[in-house]
């Protein structure tokens, strides 16, 4: 079982995480850093992490690490 953490503590190192948003929405996201700047943005990670990612504008409240993959 995973523990949900406040979203402000989510890692900004490119790690894929689960995020909790309004209306009990759970999505997989990752931080996308902007080179040569001290900022970036959260991106939605669709299946396979393809280039068709979308910027996240929905206010997210909690995050959790992805579970281990099945064996």
Image (cartoon, rainbow, N blue to C red):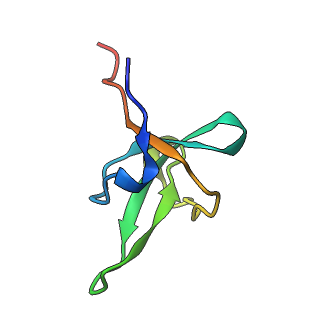
Relative to 25, 37 lies left or right: left
Q: In the image, 24: left or right of 68?
A: right
Question: Of all residues shown, which one is farthest toward the bottom?
Answer: 36
- In the rendered image, the quadrant that contains the C terminus is top left
Q: Residue at x 48, y 54 (%)?
A: 50
User: Vertical placement of 56 versus 70: above or below?
Assistant: below
Which residue does the image show at 58% across and 61% down from the upper left?
A: 56
Left-right relation of 61 to 2: right
Q: Tally the marks.
A: 0
Q: In this view, does 33 lie above or below 31?
A: below
Quadrant placement of the N terminus:
top left
x%, y% of residue 10?
36, 51
Q: Residue 11: where, in percent of width, then height? A: 31, 53
Residues 14 and 60: in front is 60
Q: In which quarter of the image is residue 64?
A: top left
The residue depicted at 38 percent of the width and 28 percent of the height is 3
Q: Where is residue 44 in the image (x, y as percent from the top left)?
A: 53, 53
Provide residue 54's location: percent of width, then percent of height. Answer: 59, 61
Q: Could you tell whether 66 is left or right of 42 in the image?
A: left
Instruction: Name the outermost residue toward the top.
Output: 71
For image coordinates 27% across by 59% down, the residue present is: 13
Q: Closer to the camera, 58 or 70?
A: 58
Examine the image and state in which quarter residue 24 appears. Answer: top right
């Amino acid at each position: 079982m995973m523990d949900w953490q406040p979203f402000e503590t989510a890692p900004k190192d490119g790690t894929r995480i689960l995020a909790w948003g309004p209306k009990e929405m759970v999505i997989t996201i990752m931080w996308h850093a902007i080179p040569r700047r001290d900022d970036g943005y959260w991106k939605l990670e669709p299946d396979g992490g393809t280039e068709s990612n979308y910027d996240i504008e929905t206010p997210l409240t909690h995050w959790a690490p992805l579970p281990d993959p099945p064996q």
